[in-house]
Amino acid sequence: MSTATSTDLVNGNISFWFDALGGRPSPRPALAGDRTADVCIVGAGLTGLWTAYYLKKADPSLDITMVEREFAGFGASGRNGGWASGLIAGSRDRFATLHGADAVRAQQRSINEAVDELVAVAASEGIAADVVKGGTIRIASTPAQARRLRAGVEEDHHWGVHESRILERNELLDRIRIPEVVAAAYTPHCARIQPARYVRALADVVESLGVRIHESTTATRIERGSVHTDRGVVRAPMILRATEGYTASLAGERRTWLPMNSSMIVTEPLPQAVWEEIGWNRGETLGDKCYSHMYGQRTSDGRIAIGGRGIPYRFGSATDRDGATQQAAIRSLVEILHRRFPATRAHRVVHAWCGVLGVPRDWCSSAAFDARTGLGYAGGYVGQGVATTNLAGRTLRDLVLGRDTELTRLPWVGHASRKWELEPLRWLGVRSMYLAYGWADRKELRGGRESRLAKLADLVTRRP
């Protein structure tokens, strides 16, 4: 029986990362009626938790309340690929057009520093989340992909990431052995984590600082001075939205950020003989230069977890139910797993899941706070959220406290994207984009040239 359709494969149940912790956690108490606070944060994922953490560290007297529809880490924070990467969440060229090259280099330095900050906080706060700063390897399997890979390294150097480099063949084989790789690149600016462990431990730390986290509490509307929920109203002079891929569920936010789906699978623990064939012993994360993009890690207990877009968007900005993904997405990821790592064919894929990430119309993230209204937000991370949430938390801290710092002058601060199109146009647009990317990937793997159709899809959708 195929691993993709095996009856013992778990599909959903939030994510494998939560299953490894024993499953869905017991919820914290819900909001019990109306209350007041100095700061109310909507959403208890990494963005909200980091913001609460840094605000409380900076000013312990602040009364901070968080409201969360499910439980801390339910969304992308507990389902992602476990990459805390130094990748800007957005287009460096687009930010440079608006703010200049030096501003983008400052943003790049800041996101690289966020990777180290995330590692440092784990150490200082006792967050045991399998954190290893092993960097990222990106691979190319066709000449067209290799050209994009080399161009990406040149762009990194232009933006100040001089540590990014092409790997020689013997260096790659010493790190990881994958058939049909024609080129590879490496950057040290990435840490592997077990995301559910990290976000749940961070929630405990934040709670220990005196922040109130109300779970099972659905925010329905945010307005100046108040957050309306199904359990009561929180009134606060400062309100921060940290809802990322679930932003469309709030009143008036349906077209703000598109909830893009990304799916993952994970194998059973692989025997030592398989690892001797593959290598991959230094904690690197792994990506490729396909248009549809694969991302993966070797877990601390000897599994391979890989992800990709699958079916990227549900009509009407709908989201999944408890992480269940489509069978087509599972089959596609299993095919990628077996092509990249033939030694895994004899071993089971045991869990599949999906999550949503927030995508602005111009694919550029933002962080903002309006001192006049007391309203702020951060998000739109386009799949680069783990380290960016840490940068967001420190940036929102400075904005809320009225500080003029290097963080508050970064180009993503106050960045505004236009709304997404009405349905069915946004569904047709995103669906067409990924059909074009899939067609381009298949053409390249058959030996074809780089696809003009994929470039056109990038141009139309403004994907960087």
Image: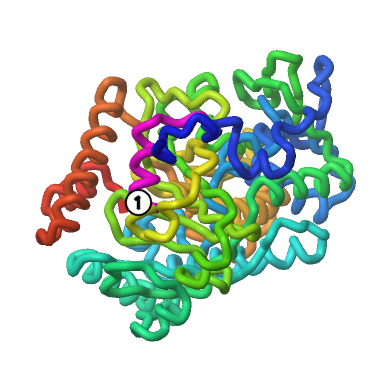
Describe residue 45's horizontal placement relative to residue 430 as left or right.
right
**191, 458: nearer the viewer:** 191
Q: Nearer the viewer, residue 159 or 330?
A: 330
Q: Is residue 389 left or right of residue 458?
A: right
Q: Residue at x 66, y 51 (%)?
A: 393
Residue 408 visible, this angle: no
State the residue position of label 1.
Answer: 336
User: Picture quarter containing residue 398?
Assistant: bottom right
Where residue 41 appears, as percent x and y from the top left, is 70, 35
Q: Position of residue 25 (x, y in %)?
A: 75, 33
Q: Amino acid at mark 1?
A: Ile
Residue 421 vs 400, above or below: the answer is above
Residue at 84%, 17% (x, y): give it. Answer: 32
Q: Relative to 397, is 135 above or below? A: below
Horizontal and vertical percent position of residue 283: 57, 68
Q: Quadrant of residue 44?
A: top right
The range drawn in magenta is 324-337
The scheme the figure's colours follow is rainbow
